[in-house]
Amino acid sequence: MRYFHSLAETMSLDEIRTHQDRCLLEVLRWVLAHNDYYRQRFMEAGLTRVDDFGTVEQLQELPTINKEDFRRTYPLGMCCIDKDQIREMHMSSGSTGSPVVIPYNEADLRQWAECMARCYVMAGAAPGNPVQITPSFGLFNGGFGMYHGARAAELFVIPTGSGNTERQVRLARDFETKILCGVVSYAIRILEVMRAMDVSLPNLKIGIFGAESFSEGMRKRIESELGIESFDIYGMTETGGVGTLGMDCPAHAGIHVWEDHYIVEVIDPVTGKQVPDGQQGEIVVTSLTRQALPVIRFRTGDLSKIVSREKCDCGRTHLRIAPIMGRTDDMLIVKGVNFFPKQVEHALLEIPGVLPHYQIVIEEADGVRDVRINVEADESVTGYMVEKHLKERLGFSPKGDVFKPGELPRQEGKAQRVFYTTPNNQ
Ligand code: DLL
């Protein structure tokens, strides 16, 4: 078993806890000393003296922050360092309001590279292995994060960025790409183009995919059709980007969160209270080692649960969370049934002949919601088959419309799966 940083990745649970208590105190002192916005939030919550505070158990007493805090303080109102110490920034735009910006100093870039390099090595990457980085190199953190980590892990970087999928496939063939990284839906696109070009990629062994929820069904398809082992990588702009929060290991028994750099809590999204391990809730993150803009109790909006705090078969001791189920605002309620897009995806892919291209269309007429599923499939699949299977799996009957392969639009970057419409506006 190889580790990028074996001491850190296999430290005992006691060592993790002591380290977290120490770093928590340091980061609280840091934000209080260097940022007015945090200071004000903490004072409002009655916390003025950090020295009275500082164990992980007490974290719950602190206020949470969310994307709104970033937007309200745009561009650098939560930054804890002087502007001339910033070396890079990334940004996510979301659908409304000001964008979320995260600045990095030199130490933050090293921290990011380290987290991401741990992920590469955990997936089986070794120095010199060709890694093809398919997210865009720009404000989105995906491309640069995978780059910084690949440099630290001494990989051979093929920085294709997004788009031009035929060229991606040719480069992967010609340079014998071993590790392909990107957004989950882009793996599907690459598969499709490989088929059309009649190219196979026998050297490709590892897929590192994330940025969106993917069902077990989608994962199996990607693995069997590309002939690879795939890994579910987690991270977000606010925590410092891709890989900062971790990835699953070859045991595939949950996502290891890099606990020497981050504390995760799982809370009930309604009451805000921590829930017991094993129970699903919203992930809240505190960064312990970032300097330019540490997050203290950031409400991610992502739903998951802690699956284990035990040492894993891979030897790592860092706790594991379940694959992300979806975001708190992704949950759909139709005719009294709650479901996440990921569950629809999983059910669809159980039907032989169905392809991994689909849309969930929520139609609302006179206050009544209905769901239509547009899905690509070969001729053996009918709309009735789709409806019947989804009824069995999800407990309600959406309308099913089957499209020929290639008929639904393809997107670059994160896929939009859910569309809202009224029957007469389409
Ligand atoms: O999506 C970082 C990333 C890039 C992760 C490439 C993995 C690969 P943001 O654009 O800030 O950053 O979006 C963060 O994406 O809160 C989740 O809702 C979602 N997300 C990220 N990773 C996963 C994953 C990047 N493995 C938001 N599974 C997060 C499910 C994920 N959702």
Image: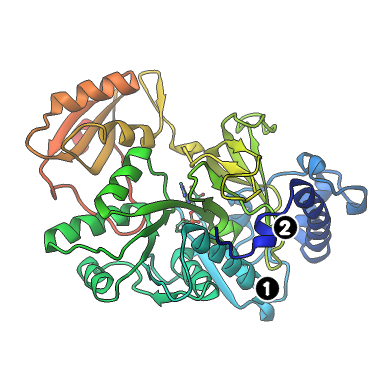
In this figure, which colouring scheme has been used for the structure?
rainbow
Residue type of the residue flagged with mark 2:
Leu
The residue sitting at 63% across, 54% down in the picture is: 258
The residue lying toward the viewer, choosing from 80 and 185, is 185
Classed neighbour count for the residue bearing mark 2: other residues with Cα under 10 Å, few (<14), some (14–19), many (≥20): many
**Residue 263 x %, y %:** 69, 49
Whole-number angstrom distance, CA of label 2 to CA of label 1: 13 Å
Classify mark 2 as within 8 Å of ligand 1 or not, answering yes or no. no
The residue lying toward the viewer, choosing from 251 and 37, is 251
Q: Quadrant of the C terminus?
A: top left
The residue sitting at 42% across, 77% down in the picture is: 156
Classed neighbour count for the residue bearing mark 1: other residues with Cα under 10 Å, few (<14), some (14–19), many (≥20): some
Residue 169 lies left or right of residue 154; in this view the side is left
The residue sitting at 92% across, 53% down in the picture is: 51
The reply to whether residue 307 is in sight is yes
**Residue 92 x %, y %:** 49, 60
Query: Do residues under tags 2 and 1 come within 8 Å of each other at their CB atoms?
Result: no
Q: Secondary structure at mark 2?
A: loop
The reply to whether residue 100 is in sight is no
Q: Is residue 25 above or below residue 147?
A: above
Comes first in the chain, label 2 or label 1: 1
Q: Is residue 71 above or below residue 360?
A: below
Count of number-bearing discs: 2
Task: Say which residue label 2 marks.
Answer: 288
Q: Is residue 317 above or below residue 306?
A: below
Task: Say which residue label 1 marks.
Answer: 107
Residue 316 lies left or right of residue 126; in this view the side is right
Q: Secondary structure at mark 1?
A: helix
Q: Quadrant of the N terminus?
A: bottom right
The residue lying toward the viewer, choosing from 209 and 94, is 209
Residue type of the residue flagged with mark 1:
Ala
